[in-house]
Every structure is written in structure tokens, then in C-alpha cells.
Amino acid sequence: MAKDPILQVETTCGSLLYELQIIWDEVGETETDRDKMLLELERECLEVYRRKVDQANRCRAQLRQAIADAEAELASICSAMGERPVHIRQSDQSVGSLKLELGKILPELEEMQKRKIERRNQFLLVLEEVENITNDIKGQGEHVLSKPPIDETDLSMRKLEELNCHLQALQKEKSDRVETIRKHLCTLYSHCSVLGMDFNEVVSQVNPTLTDPEGPRSLSDHTIDNLDAAVQKLREVKIQRMQKLQDLATTMLELWNLMDTPIEEQQEYQHITCNIAASEHEITQANSLSEDFIKYVEAEVVRLGEVKASKMKELVVKKRSELEEICRKTHMLPVSDSAMDQTIVAIESGIVDATLVLEHLEQHISKVKEEALSRKEILEKVEKWLSACDEESWLEEYNRDDNRYNAGRGAHLTLKRAEKARNLVNKLPVMVEALASKTIVWEREKGIEFLYDGIRLLSMLEEYNLLRQEREEEHRRQRDHKKLQGQLIAEQEALYGSKPSPSKPLGGKKAPRMSTGGTATNRRLSLGAGMHQTPKPNKKSDQRQVQVDGALSTGRRGLDVAGLPSRKQSMNPCEQLQSPLVRKPFSPISTTVVASKANIATPQQLVPNSKSNAVNEISSFATPVKNNNIIKNLEEEKMMMMMQTPKNVAAMIPIPSTPATISVPMQTAPTPLNNNNNARFLPEKAEVIEYSFEERRLAFMLQSESPIHV
Amino acid sequence: MSLPPPSAGRELANPPSDGISNLRFSNTSDHLLVSSWDKRVRLYDVSTNSLKGEFLHGGAVLDCCFHDDSSGFSVGSDNKVRRIVFNVGKEDVLGMHEKPVRCVEYSYAAGQVITGSWDKTVKCWDPRGASGPERTQVGTYLQPERVYSLSLVGNRLVVATAGRHVNIYDLRNMSQPEQRRESSLKYQTRCVRSYPNGTGYALSSVEGRVAMEFFDLSEAAQAKNYGTFATGGCDGFVNIWDGNNKKRLYQYSKYPSSIAALSFSRDGQLLAVASSYTFEEGEKSHEPEAIFVRNVNEIEVKPKPKAYPNPAA
């Protein structure tokens, strides 16, 4: 029979009771005792029940607690993980018994616990990684020792994601830094290469860990900053050097240009000069900016500079000699040598810049060239004058030579030369005159004196004229003397019946001794005495008569031109020239002469036949009237009176022979244009009066018509 | 003694007895007017070699020119400007300068007589002024210096003075010179003559040079057509020049004395040469005056210059 245990018990209990009762009965227990035992029994049974129930209660409570605990834990896990449990426990859910419930919860809990642990591990991983990377980033020495705390309360995915993101960010940062450092190192490497620096050394100065490509490197901000700074610094150095090199290259190009350096020399440095306009990043060649290299280029530039300096010096010397040459050619005084030498020394010692000196020299040269140009015309004339003076002296020598008409070898050449010389000498006064007036104009325009080898040209001309004057005076004196003598002789001869040939008057005064005026040392001032020489008397084979000075001999064509005396004779019969009246020979003309002219000797012969020689002998008609001192003497004086301008007197045609009359007009007279030699040259008073042939003729005519002097 | 070479030309009879200052052919005939220092103006008929008229003045006659075949003008050292009428033998004074009058020209274009004097003026006269010198003077124009030579062509007047000045005037406006120039020659101006074509003038100097100038300087830069011209010098030679080639074409044989004046006849067939000492060397004895008239086209072959022998023994 399937008996309910309790029933069973009860049965048992009952039987027991029965039995008990039997026992008592047998024992004969009192009722009270019985009751007491029964109470005790009950009480004891109650106790046992109570104990059992308590136990069961306790069990139940434990179960409940366990469930609650489990639920609590689950809840906490879930909340920490941010997830809901798979099975959501509902409060109203009747799971049934507690044991069942517990049975359900516990696996969930286990599950969640397992997941929590997994999650937690994930976190750990991430955090560990983060820690690592942060360590790397923060760099050694900043090692983070503590483990990163896990926030147990937040193990959610979200948090995990967060941490993952954070990790990724860190990873990125790390990789960025690595990259940055790599780049910097590349750049640094490039810079070092270009600059010729040791890359490892430079890098190790930044941070030693960087030198080892394998080992861990510092990625700290500090490192990166330092690296960056290093790169910048090297870049600056590179730029600096590059600029310096470019400057050097520019200078080099300039110097090459200046000195026309051949291509072969330039070739060597081509690689530098081609970078002359490059920018920093374009220069990448190793060692192209190293210190050594720059020094090397510098040295070349210095060398070129020295070459230039020496060439400049050469140029300075050359220019200076050019300057001297110009001065020499144009008879200007050259620059003082001492100044030049000093300048050259100054250039050498670098005090003075050669370019400045050259500029200065060039300016000086062009100025001198200008001046030389302006002097050219006058210098040409001076040369002509000087060569004419030479011919003058030659002519004088020649005229003194008694043998000059001997037909020897080349005699015709000499004759030709003599004729040319005479022509030239005739032109001399005009030449001097023209030269002087040109010089005055020049001096006036320029405001400075015209110097010829340091001497004022006008003074030279003046001296020359002075000399000439003196000489002519001397000649005249001698001629007068001779004339006087001749006159005496002629008179004697007349007394004794001999007559000099009327048609062949002979002039025959030799030129007096050369007057050596003052500075006749150089040729400019020497006067050709031939100027004044009268033809030798004995040249003409036929009548060589009296020494009548100034008379013409027929054959004397050429010489007469030069000779004052050639005119002289015709002075005498001035009035009678055109009139049919023939002056008697030997009639004194002193009466016809103005008082002061007493010394003009009487001419013996007349040249009554106006067809005589005189006229046609004159070959140089091209020259203006000059060299006609003697003739002019008489008419001059007359004209002087005619013109009535004392100032112009001597201007006309100067100078009578007597010193007395000479002096006055001379001192006051300005030089006439077509003056002859005796005019004193006074450039300061440039009042020049010229007269045409007709004016003179008229003056003469009027004067001869006047009754003053007969 | 040989005969004078025929190429010297015909010598005119009755030459002046003192220096010849100028001679001119007439524009209309072969009459030659000659002024002289013997104070006379002479009119010659060249074709007949005869003296047609002679006028005595108060002083040396320095220049003369024709007006037409019946009259001419003369000026001289007596400061007077005269008109002389040939056939009638009459003369009247147009006016005076203050100093000797050196040159005279007649301008057909202006109908005026133009004179230049050593009083540094050029004066213009109207020869039709009947009554007296005061009415005839048309204008007086101050020159920088004494007038040495004048030349007219068309409406232009060229004045050469002492000091080598050259003034060029337009006769229609004499108030001031059209151009003021300085002679390009270095020596005293002797004579100025305009080109017949009116483009310029020739200047000669006492040195013996001739400068060819143009009025219009722009023309001067162009090809110059100087043409041929004759010069006579104190060397007694007459040269004919080719101005374009600057060469001498021919030289006549030497004349006895300086060439004082030259004049071509109106048709250019004849050249009158005054051989007369021009006082370039002052007072001296010299050959007598002579006037030669030669044919110009007879010179087809260049004559060799011959020494002119002494005609008189």
C-alpha cells in the first residue's frame, strides 16, 4: 500500500501509543504520569517538528537568498556590462519553486559571469595596449608604472568601444609620430648630406634612440620638437650657405665678365653658377654646400679678385701712359708723375679703389683729348710756323754760302728749296699773325693760356717777332750804311766820269749778323737771316756796280721776294715812277724824304724804265703786301699822316727804319693783319686795321699831290 | 725779240695812263667802260678799237658800270656818285658819300644804283631823281666795315667789306641783311662776284684764293654746280677754272702786269683783261697800263704759258 508517509508515521505513532498504553497498563502508571508523558511526548514531537520546520524554513530562506544573490549579481553584471540578461526575470513570473528558479538563474549567472570575464579581458587587452602605446608616446623615462584601472562598473561595449577608439587614436598618433620622425629624419639626412655633416652624429644629439633604426625610438614630444628644431636649424644653415655660395657665384660671374675669362676656366665652376638662382629645396647634391666646398669656391673668388686687381693696375698704368702720350703729342704738360705713383701705391694697398681711379683717369683722358682736339688746329699752325722758321734759318745759311749758284749735284734741288723757302718766309709774318689771332681767340674762349710745352705760345710768338724786328733794324742800319758808302763812291765816279749802269742796280748787302735776341736758343725763335738778306752784289755778271743797297738785280727773282732791299730801290723814285719825268740820277732824294728820314740814303739809280726788272721779278704775288719795309717807309709815313690816326700808323705798314721813328708807332701800334715782320706783337690790344690796295694807292697819290715835301 | 703771242688778245689803243680800277662790257653791245686812277672814265668800242668817250672826274675813278648803251655810272675818290651820258658827254652827280666810293652797280631789277664806300655804307640811288643829290638817295645802309666789293644778281646784293665781312641783302628789303657771313678765306677780301645763275657768289682774297659760296646753305650741301669762271691775279695770269672739278681749264699767257679787272662780253665770246699794276706792293715802277680783249672760244687748245717778253726796250 502506498501509504502516505505521514500517514505512515501517524500509524506508527498510533501503534506506538497503543503500545504505550499497554505498557502503562502494565506498569500501572498513574494517569497523571501518563498525561505528563503524553505531554512530554507531544512536546517532544513538537520540538522535532519545529526543528524540521525551522530547517526547512532555513532552507527556503537560503534558497531565496541564493536566488536573490544570484539575481543581484546578475543585475550588477548586467548593469556593468550594459547588457540585459538573456532571460529577463520578471517579478510576476512564476517560475515555480524556488529551486527551479535558482536552477534557472544560476546558469544565467554563470553565463554572465563568463561573459563578464571575457569582457573584462578585452578591456584588459585594450587597456594594456593603450598603456603600451602611451608609454611609447610619452617616451622612455615617463614610463607609466601602474596598471590602468579598470572601471568594473563599466564594462559595457560602449565603454569598450570608447577604449578601442582611444586605442586607435593612440595608435594613430603613434604612427603619426613615427612618420613625422621618419620624415624629419629623411630631411635631416638630406640636409646633412648636402651640408656635408655626419647624419648619425646630428641625430644622436637630438635623441640617441633615433640612431638605431631597429630599436625602440623615442616618440616623445620632446624628441619630435628637438628633431624639428634640428631640421629647421640645418635648413637655415643650408639656406645661409646657399646664399653665400650664390653670392660667390655671382661675384665669380661678374669677375669672369669683367676679365673675359676663357670658357675652359669657367667650365670648372659651371655646376655652381648654374645654381645661382636656385631655391633651397632645389639643392640636393651631396656636399654641395659643405664647408670645404664653400671654402674652395671662396678661394677661387679671391683668386679671381686678385687677378682683377692686377689687371686694373695694369690698366691704370696703361691709361696713364696714354694720357702722357696725348699730352706729349699736343705739347701739353703731362700730369705729374709723383701723383700717379702715389695713386698706384694706394691701389696696391687697397686704400683706393682701382675702378675709381680708372674712372678718374678716363675722365681726365677724355678731357685732355677734348683739349687736344681744340688745340689741334693751332698746333698744326705752330708746326707749320716752326718748320717755316727752320727753312728761314736754312735759307740764311744758304744765302751766306757763296757757292750756292755753282751747279753741282742737286743744285737745282737746292735752288728749288731756296725758292720755296723764300715763299715760305714771305708768308711767315702773316702766318705768325694768323696764329697769334687764332691763339687769342682760343685763349679767350677757353679762358686759359695756350701753352706749348709749358710755355705760353703767345710769348713765343712775341719773342720771335721781337727778334725779327731787331734783325731787321740791324739789316737796315747796315744797308743804310752801305748805301751811304755807295753814294760816296758813285759821286766820286760821277766826278770821274764813270757811270753805273742804270739798269742793273745791285743790291748787295749781306745780312748783318744775326741778331740773337734773347731766347733764340731753340728753333722757334731763330730767325732766318735770309729773310733780310739782300742779294749778293756780285752775282750778276754784268754790272756789278756800287753797293747800292736795296737795288734789285735782274736775276734775283727768287731772292728778291724775301729781300727787303729789293723794294728799297723803288722807294727812291717813288714819285717819279709813273710820271714821264725821269729823275736824274744822283739827284738827292733826301729832300723828298721826310726830315726824320735823313738816313735813307739816296738811291743811285733810278729805275726810270719802269719796265725794268722789278715788277716781274716778284713771284709771290699771292702773299699780301709785306716784307716791304723799305718802300713802305716813305709812303708809310705819308700815309700815316694821311690817315691821321696815330694809332693806325704803324698798323698800316710799319716802320720806318730809323729807330726814332720806329719806336713810337711800334709801341702804340696794334698789329695789322697783313703785317710784316717788324710789327710788334701786342695781342692784348687787338685792334687790327687793314687797308686795301686801293686805299693805299689813294693815300699815296694824295700825298704825292700835296705840296708838303718837295 | 719775238712778237707778242697772238693769244694775248687785241690790245686796245689809248689805254689809261694810270692804274685801271675796273672795266666792264656793256650788256647790249661790245662797248667797254673803263675807270682809271688817272681820274678818267673811258668808253671804248671794242669792235673798232676806238675810244668813244672820255670823262674827267675830280679824283681817281674807282668803279664804273653801264646803265644802258647811252649812259653809265661812275664813282671815285672824290666821294661822288655820277651818271655819265656817253653821247652827250654830260655828267651829273647823283649824290655823295663821306669817303671815297669804291664800288658801283646798277640793279635792273630794282632800277637803282647801288654804291659801296669806305665810309662803311652802302647807298641806293634812284637815277631818275632829277633834281639834285638829296632826292636821289633811296637808302643808306651801314656796313660793319669799309666796303671793298659789291655784286648783284637778281634781287640779291652781296657786299664784301674789310674785316672779311660779307653781307647778303635782298634788294626788296634792305632794312637788314638777309644773311651776315664771314668770309671763309683767311685773308682780306679782294673781290666778290655772284654767279649768273643767282645761286651763290665767289669771293677772292689777297692771298690768291677763291671761295665758292652758296646763298642757300641747303643748296650748298647738294651737288654743287659752279660752272667755269675766270680769275686774274697779281701774278699777271688769267686762269679759267672748272668749278665742279676744281681744276684749272686753261691759263692765258702772262700779261705784262697785274690783272686789275676782267670782264666777259654779253655773249661770253670776248674777255677784256686789264693789265695794270694794282699797287699790291705799294709804290714801285711797273709796266704801263694795257687793255687786252681776247676771244674766248679761240682757246681750244690749252695755251702754254709763255714768258711775256719785255715789249719796250
Image: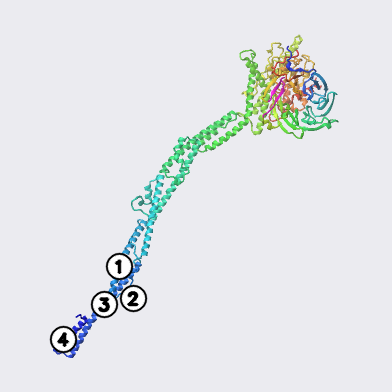
For label 4, the residue is A19
With respect to residue A130, does A489 lie above or below?
above
For label 2, the residue is A92
Residue B38 shown left or right of residue A207 in the figure: right
The residue closer to the viewer here, A60 or B242, is A60
x and y percentages locating residue B255 in the rendered image: 73, 18
For label 1, the residue is A111
Q: Secondary structure at mark 1?
A: helix
The residue closer to the viewer here, B54 or A428, is B54
Q: Chain of mark 1?
A: A
CB atoms of marks 1 and 4 within 8 Å? no
Q: Residues within 10 Å of mark 4 (few under 14, many from 20)?
A: few
| Residue A204 seen anywhere in this rendered image of the structure | yes
With respect to residue A39, does A366 lie above or below?
above
Residue B24 shown left or right of residue A386 in the figure: right
For label 3, the residue is A58
Residue A330 shown left or right of residue B107 in the figure: left
